[in-house]
């Protein structure tokens, strides 16, 4: 059927793999974002009046005490990271693996 047309595969319900690097981001002149965000940034955005920006008291307490367990890196709690991978809608929740096949996070957004 329609052998003269090119059809591209639908990636739904298939494993998607892409290659990239964790790296910072320079969206415009003189603007640079680190390759990671921190718990401090979440605390700074706390706004109990806005559902998406309400930080639970327990998380604030852990932040004040710097109680990050074994997850701290140089006394900082890193939360999210930026990677230069090709992703598309539908990739959210997909695992992000390092070169050794170890889980390092989940894909949830892109820029």
Image: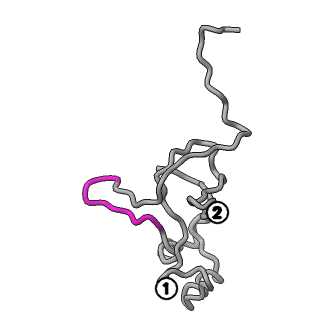
Image quarter in which the N terminus is found: top right
Q: Residue at x 62, y 65 (%)?
A: 51
Q: Secondary structure at mark 1?
A: loop
Question: Which of the 4 quarters of the picture holds residue 11?
Answer: top right
Whether label 2 touches label 1, CB < 8 Å: no
Does the magenta stretch mainly form a helix, a strand or a loop?
strand
Q: Indicate yes or no whether the magenta region holds residue 101.
A: no
Rendered location of residue 34, percent (x, y): 40, 66
Give the magenta part as a residue range.
27-36
Residue 33 horizontal side relative to residue 37, left or right: left
Question: Which of the 4 quarters of the picture holds residue 97?
Answer: bottom right
Rendered location of residue 40, percent (x, y): 48, 77
* Label 2, label 1: how far apart the Cα atoms are: 22 Å
User: Residue 94 bears which disc, if any?
Assistant: none
Identify the mark nearer the N-term, 2 or 1: 1
Q: Residue at x 60, y 75 (%)?
A: 55
Q: Indicate yes or no whether the magenta region holds residue 32.
A: yes
Foreground mark, 2 or 1? 2
Residue 15 horizontal side relative to residue 73, left or right: right
Residue occupied by mark 2: 103
Image colouring: one colour
Examine the rendered structure and indicate whether residue 37 appears above or below residue 97.
Answer: below
């Amino acid at each position: 059927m329609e052998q003269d047309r090119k059809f591209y595969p639908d990636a739904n319900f298939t494993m998607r793999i892409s290659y990239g690097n964790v790296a910072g981001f320079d969206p415009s002149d003189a603007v640079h974002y680190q390759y990671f965000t921190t718990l401090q940034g979440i605390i700074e955005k706390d706004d109990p009046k806005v559902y998406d920006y309400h930080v639970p008291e327990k998380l604030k307490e852990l932040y004040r005490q710097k109680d990050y367990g074994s997850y701290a890196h140089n006394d900082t709690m890193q939360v999210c990271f930026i990677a230069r991978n090709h992703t598309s809608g539908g990739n959210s929740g997909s695992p992000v693996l390092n070169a050794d096949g170890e889980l390092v996070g989940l894909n949830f957004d892109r820029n």
